[in-house]
Amino acid sequence: MLSLGKNHDPRRNGEILSQINGGQLDLRRALHETEKLYLECAEKKILSPAPVQKKQAFQEKVLSGLFRPFASVTELGVPSKTRMDAAGNVYPEWKETLDIEYNNLLSRLTREVNVADFGAIGDGRTDNTAAFKKAIGNGQVKVRVPEGIFITKGILLTSWTCLVGAGKGKTIIKLHGDAPKGTRLVTNANHWRGNHHLFMQGMTLDWNVERLGNVQKTATWGNHSSCLTYANVTYGWVRDVEAINPGLHCFDITSTLYNYAGDGYRAKGGSRYVWLDNLNGYGFGDDGITTHHSEKILISYSHMCDPSGRAHAKGFSNSNGIEVDDGSRDVMLINNSTARCFGGVECKAHENSSAAANVQIIGHLSVNDNRSFNFRHIGHHKSTDNKSKTAYNLMATNLAAIAPIYSDLYADSTPRGLVVSAYENVVINRFTLVGDPDYNYKGNPVIAIQYRTRKVILNHVNLFDFKKAGAGIKVFGGANRADSVRIENVVYKNSSSKAVEIGHGIQDVTIINVKEFIEPALNKK
């Protein structure tokens, strides 16, 4: 069975995905197919249940009122177009703008310095906070950081700054033992006015959670306690960087403040045009990579694994490898991987915030995550909840879920390859799920379409070796039922239950070309 460790090279993800799907996938054709299916989904007219007018509790009214001055009305727009160059590289159409600004950044650099020339010593003991501050100055600078372990109480990046090390595991920037719990190891200098044109490359960021001892919770509040935080950043790049053991997140692309003004509102001061590439992270208290109230974010060839979950109460840790969270939109994930997280990729929102929307996942490898792919808008699931105003437009192509498992991170959560709750306009195209034939899935379904989800298309789904699971794909019925679901081209092999199960009361479901191959031994009493 495939296992991806902390030192997995995520640049191999495309090759591994090709091996899993038998090397048969024509990606250009598959992406065109996904786009076509999405248009069919989005254009379909359905009868929605009468809207629920659920009254806000007094505490919720007060909270949303406090955040409202820092928020703006959410405008969903439409997903960005996908491009593919002659070499087969995939990217969003807006990356062309980011490439122009990268050249603009390089042209604005007036000096190149080495942090050692400002007194920095990479001996793992010396406090280098002042040296980094002097080297960065007012920006328009490339700061080189040589090999070594550089202790600091935090680094602030001003606009027009490049911070470049000698490589992962060679240049290590480590948080000082006396740094408060809420410290961000590296962040931009001004979260309120914002910063722009920031570039980081070639280093390990060690948040040094060990300095806290055996505390019950490793993070403070909001977007604090992370290895790298870009808050209100326009035009940012992070390449070839490893982040380890943060109290909260390895990498957080976010707004000035997390915002809870209510569904239909997004935070002001979100980040825009940011590319994260070839990143590794582990030991995170919450999520590996996360985005909040930000847009036009590209995450590619990155690997997140083995969270500590210590930002949460024990056994209730929603620690995801990659999380596209509250108010995010126009986010593209390309050939990333996750292992042994609660969620591999989670697209979501809290009840009192707008959902992540217009998200595209192109190639993702999930290994031993509890819920490989988890899409939900919390608090908008039940027939008695308000319908989500913002949980729309998720597209995924070329996914692989390998042996989802139970996890101590979230003790009561059952393993799933995919869960969709509350979202509309969801297309999953070309999805391979491989179970462990000896693992006890306790009769639970592998894929769950549930909780008022509408307008979902699953196409070319292959499920293998879930011998002790329930249905391959279950569309849940009842008062909180999903509806308007299309399932086609499914292969369910060497598993003990039925391929597709449809719950009570579902009015609009289409099932086309489902093939079940069951070993003779599984039919024996």
Image: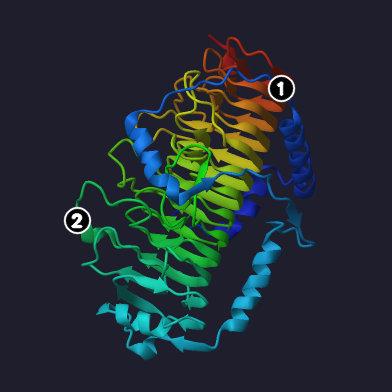
Give me the disc on residue 515: 1
- In depth, the one of 328 and 360 nearer the eye is 328
The residue drawn where x is 32% and y is 88% is 119
Compared with 477, 295 (above or below) is: below
Does dot 2 land on a helix, a strand or a loop? loop
As rendered, which of 139 and 127 lies closer to the eye?
139
For residue 33, which numbered disc appears in the image? none
Q: Is the C-beta separation of discs 1 and 2 under 8 Å?
A: no
The secondary structure type at the circle numbered 1 is: strand
Position in image of residue 202 (x %, y %): 49, 72
Which of pointers 1 and 2 indicates the residue nearer the eye? 2
For this view, does 502 lie left or right of residue 350?
right
Residue 274 picture location, percent across and down: 56, 61
Q: Is residue 353 above or below residue 241?
A: above
- Point 42% across, 63% down: residue: 191
Foreground of the two, 329 or 333: 329
Quarter occupied by residue 424: top right
